[in-house]
Image: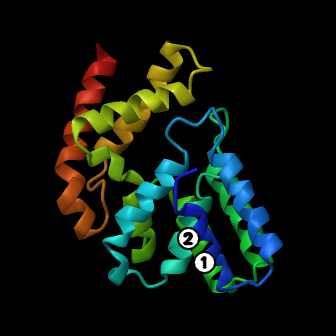
Amino acid sequence: MVPGLQKQFYFLSGRYSDDDALIAACWNEIDNAYGSKKRYYHNLSHINSMIAELEKAKSSLENPDAILFSIFYHDIVYKVSRKDNEFKSALLAGQRLRQMNVPEQTVSRCFAHITATASHSKSEDPDTNYFTDADLSILGKPLPEYELYCRNIRKEYALFPWFLYKKGRKKVVEHFLQMPEIFKTPDFREEYEAAARENLRRELHQLDR
């Protein structure tokens, strides 16, 4: 468990519910999901990184609580053999947030934020754009961090033989490179866009070899 995440979740949830047992059960569900031994990248460290990224943009967010709940739940369902992980994660988030008496407007925004990670397309909601940008921030990190990310993603998809993984991964990389803008907010675009494209082009070249 990443230090501090449990405390943040309890503090966030405690603003809406005084049911300590419920909050503890929700946290344990999150901890168990992201703490799976099969998760090498989509784990609690990823949640922690997203929180750190969005802390820098906190003053620009309209509904920080919706963003934070979305971070905790956006990959809670993660099965590499399925294509509906984002939708399933969003549904589960909605169930848990309603149990905690979170207002429906915030629940709806969480659903929109989480399902947006299926394509990372630009949204009319600036908060969604900040959320998806934080999710993709790893793409623009220094090369050693990016290469570690690539290795960890491959480990998560270890059940697929290399030729199948290579085909799927190339589609993902090409999808991002074909976007007019990978990062949808000025802050993230200025910080990460150029480096992300360089990292992705390098990975694509390696996959083509």
Which of these two is toward me, 122 or 203?
A: 203
**Residue behind mark 1:** 11
Point 74% across, 83% down: residue: 17
Give coordinates of residue 12: x percent, y percent: 60, 77
**Residue behind mark 2:** 8
Callout 1–callout 2 Cβ contact below 8 Å: yes
* Residue 200, quarter of picture: top left
Point 61% across, 63% down: residue: 6
Give coordinates of residue 97: x percent, y percent: 72, 74
Q: Which mark is residue 54?
A: none
* Residue 190, quarter of picture: bottom left
Side (left or right) of 89 relative to 117? right
Side (left or right) of 184 relative to 24? left
Which of these two is toward me, 204 or 76?
A: 76
Give coordinates of residue 168: x percent, y percent: 48, 28
**Badge 1: how crowded within 10 Å, few (<14), some, or many (20+)?**
few
Point 34% across, 44% down: residue: 176
